[in-house]
Amino acid sequence: MIAADTGTWVVFLEGGAGEDAQLLDRALKDRQVLMVPVVLTELLSDPKLPSGVAETLSEVPLVEIASGYWQRAGALRAKVLAKRRKARFGDALPVMGDEAGLHLVLGLPDDANDREVTAASYDAGVIVRPLASYYNSETPERRGLLLGYACVPNERIGPAFDTLAGVIERTAMKTPAVPTRAA
């Protein structure tokens, strides 16, 4: 049984052939998929989503949130924060929305092309979504990336972020960031 994040669903619905999309396709055929309520909300909020797709997505069984889930999520986050790690990019790339526990928005410099970063990240094996695709105008108010981590094993998050950081340094930063970690 799997519960895919929004990014995986988007790639799947766009016909992507990545490993995550293939796993989701197989799990759907085997009826081994649960829908995370927040992910369903995000998917259904796309004004361009065909009604047939919306109906199909709504038929996927929802994950039941067990009693005490948010308390456990908060305790886990407190442990991570207690390690007092410094952000690799300092305040240059703000992270927003970490309270939700499923997605983060990583801000990029105003002159960055988040669609270019997304394409380069995909080529490097990391799936992210450009924040520009969530704006109705051609000139987004903010540049950034939507990062989904609900179904990513903890041991894969660090290496995936290191890969993403390298992509960002090559495509969006004028000067390379210096990695820093508190002891």
Image (cartoon, grey):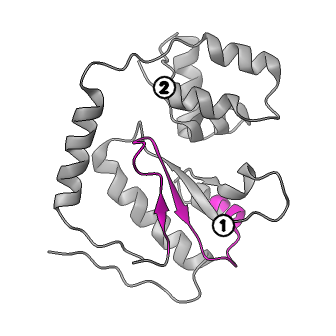
Does the magenta-highlighted stretch encompass residue 103? Answer: yes
Q: Return the residue found at the far right.
A: 138
Seen in the picture, residue 13 relative to 138 is either above or below; the reply is: above
The percent coordinates of residue 115 (x first, y second) are 71, 61
Disc 1 crowd rating (10 Å Cα; few below 14, some 14-19, many 20+) is many
- Is residue 110 rendered to the left or right of residue 146? right
Q: Residue at x 47, y 14 (%)?
A: 32
Instruction: Please name whichever residue, 9 or 144, is drawn nearer the observer in this view of the structure.
Output: 144
Earlier sequence position, callout 2 versus callout 1? 2
Residue at which label 1 appears: 143
Q: Amino acid at mark 2?
A: Val
Seen in the picture, residue 89 relative to 126 is either above or below; the reply is: below
Q: Amino acid at mark 1?
A: Arg
Q: Quadrant of the N terminus?
A: top left
Instruction: Please name whichever residue, 71 or 178, is drawn nearer the observer in this view of the structure.
Output: 71
Name the mark on residue 95: none
Q: Return the residue found at the far left.
A: 183
Name the mark on residue 36: 2
Q: What span is colored magenta in the figure?
A: 93-119
Q: Residue at x 23, y 58 (%)?
A: 81
Q: Quadrant of residue 74?
A: top left
Quick one: SS at disc 1?
A: loop
